[in-house]
């Protein structure tokens, strides 16, 4: 057999093997390591849950170190949310057109400066919603109608965030480093959250016309879907919730706590705490219900339009072998005190960032790091829970 003929036979064999593997069934032995499509990534409709009201949002945060070409350095933490809501009751009163609700908001926490934020929302015909969000697909693809804000990608490949507002542009890539984790509850509100709880951010940030490169840094991502089977919105079914994410050198914790109307400001019907090893990407422990003690301290009273709400300035969470503490050191306040159509139902959301000295103590190991901390109060919660 001459050498030329041998090379041709080898090439044909490689092609046949490649075609055979490409055509293998997803569950066949030849593809046992193939990725299973994750349809929790893309958009959903109220009809997917037989719900009369559904909301979902995609959330990204990060604690970044930035450097410009001239050597200037900055530290900047941020969060960005892109969201949408669906309901059969969301109808234009003049034309009778079925509508979809879209919103986006962010908070910026520059080191040594005041935090800033923005909340933007709009209504679009439901018949056009797929121009902005891809539904029932194994990836995220959300473009806000102004064309200046886009969030897309997947947990397996990573997420791109391109977000412009005024004199700020975020062009960021987030690559998760651990597997997806899930939080879910039925009471006091029905919700599921899909978390890509730890990963690294890269890319660039433009502030006031000056571009900075992101030095590799920590980030967090989740996709949350609350819904209700009746005409009430999810905000009407609870007093509010608390969420936090603490990151140290080795550990990361994620806490979800949801308060029923009867719980008031400092009780929790739903509590769930996850401890993750950042270096291995594995869950070390999970705690829920009575295993988790929540202690909120140093309450502040805040005037919001014609109402007064209160929020804790310090949060401590403990289990038999895990203790977490954080302070609401830098806070942005997001008010959504009415829904489309003028319905007086919404929420007041306090989203805080602590750059250092938040603590995680697991057994005998104590570490310090950063924390994002959210405390939300719904309008019905304000009405039903008189201040002390």
Image (spheres, grey):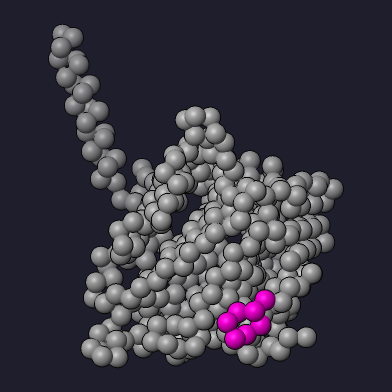
Q: Is residue 143 left or right of residue 339?
A: left
Total numbered labels: 0
Q: Quadrant of the C terminus?
A: bottom right
| Residue 102 on image: x %, y % | 37, 71
Instruction: Tell me where residue 3 sits by quadrant.
Output: top left
Q: Is residue 304 left or right of residue 251?
A: left
Q: Residue furthest right?
A: 364
| Residue 150 on image: x %, y % | 36, 56
Residue 288 visible in image = yes
Q: What predominant SS class does the magenta segment belong to?
A: strand
Vertical order, 80 against 199 (above or below): below
Task: Identify the residue at image location x=50%, y=77%.
Answer: 336
Front residue of this view, candidates 151 and 328: 328
Q: Is residue 164 left or right of residue 8?
A: right
Q: Residue furthest front?
A: 208
| Residue 13 on image: x %, y % | 22, 27
Magenta residue span? 302-308
Instruction: Tell me where residue 20 sits by quadrant.
Output: top left
Vertical order, 329 against 301 (above or below): above
Residue 52 visible in image = no
Q: Quadrant of the N terminus?
A: top left
Front residue of this view, candidates 183 and 102: 102
Instruction: Tell me where residue 6 sits by quadrant.
Output: top left
Vertical order, 35 against 383 (above or below): above
Q: Residue furthest top?
A: 2
Task: Identify the residue at image location x=73%, y=60%.
Answer: 327
Task: Identify the residue at image location x=73%, y=70%.
Answer: 312
| Residue 318 on image: x %, y % | 79, 63
In magenta stretch: residue 335: no
Task: Identify the residue at image location x=82%, y=61%.
Answer: 320
Front residue of this view, candidates 308 and 32: 308
């Amino acid at each position: 057999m001459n050498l030329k003929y041998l090379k041709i036979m080898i090439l044909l064999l490689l092609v046949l093997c490649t075609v055979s593997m490409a055509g293998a069934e997803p569950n066949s032995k030849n593809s046992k390591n193939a990725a299973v499509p994750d349809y929790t990534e893309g958009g959903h409709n109220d009809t997917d849950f037989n719900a009369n009201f559904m909301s979902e949002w995609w959330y990204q945060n990060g604690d970044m170190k930035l450097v410009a070409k001239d050597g200037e350095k900055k530290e900047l933490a941020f969060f960005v949310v892109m969201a949408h809501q669906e309901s059969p009751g969301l109808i234009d009163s003049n034309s009778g057109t079925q509508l979809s609700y879209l919103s986006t908001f962010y908070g910026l926490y520059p080191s040594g400066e005041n935090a800033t934020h923005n909340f933007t929302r709009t209504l679009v015909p439901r018949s056009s919603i797929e121009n902005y969000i891809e539904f029932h697909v194994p990836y995220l693809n959300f473009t806000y109608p102004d064309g200046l804000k886009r969030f897309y990608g997947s947990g397996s490949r990573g997420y791109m965030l391109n977000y412009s507002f005024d004199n700020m542009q975020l062009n960021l890539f987030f690559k998760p480093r651990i597997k997806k984790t899930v939080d879910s509850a039925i009471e006091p509100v029905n919700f599921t959250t899909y978390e890509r709880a730890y990963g690294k951010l890269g890319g660039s940030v433009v502030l006031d016309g000056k571009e900075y490169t992101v030095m590799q840094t920590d980030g967090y991502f989740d996709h949350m879907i609350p819904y209700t089977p009746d005409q009430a919105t999810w905000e009407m079914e609870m007093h509010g919730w608390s969420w936090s994410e603490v990151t140290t050198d080795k550990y990361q914790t994620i806490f979800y706590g949801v308060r029923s109307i009867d719980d008031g400001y400092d009780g929790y019907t739903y509590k769930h705490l996850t401890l993750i090893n950042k270096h291995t990407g594995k869950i070390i422990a999970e705690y829920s219900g009575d295993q988790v003690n929540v202690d909120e301290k140093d309450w502040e009273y805040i005037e919001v339009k014609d109402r007064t709400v209160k929020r804790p300035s310090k949060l401590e969470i403990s289990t038999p072998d895990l203790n977490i503490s954080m302070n609401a050191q830098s806070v942005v306040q997001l008010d959504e005190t009415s829904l489309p159509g003028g319905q007086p139902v919404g929420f007041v959301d306090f989203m805080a960032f602590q750059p250092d000295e938040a603590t995680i103590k697991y057994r005998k190991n104590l570490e310090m790091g950063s924390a994002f901390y959210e405390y939300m109060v719904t309008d019905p919660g304000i009405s039903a829970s008189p201040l002390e």
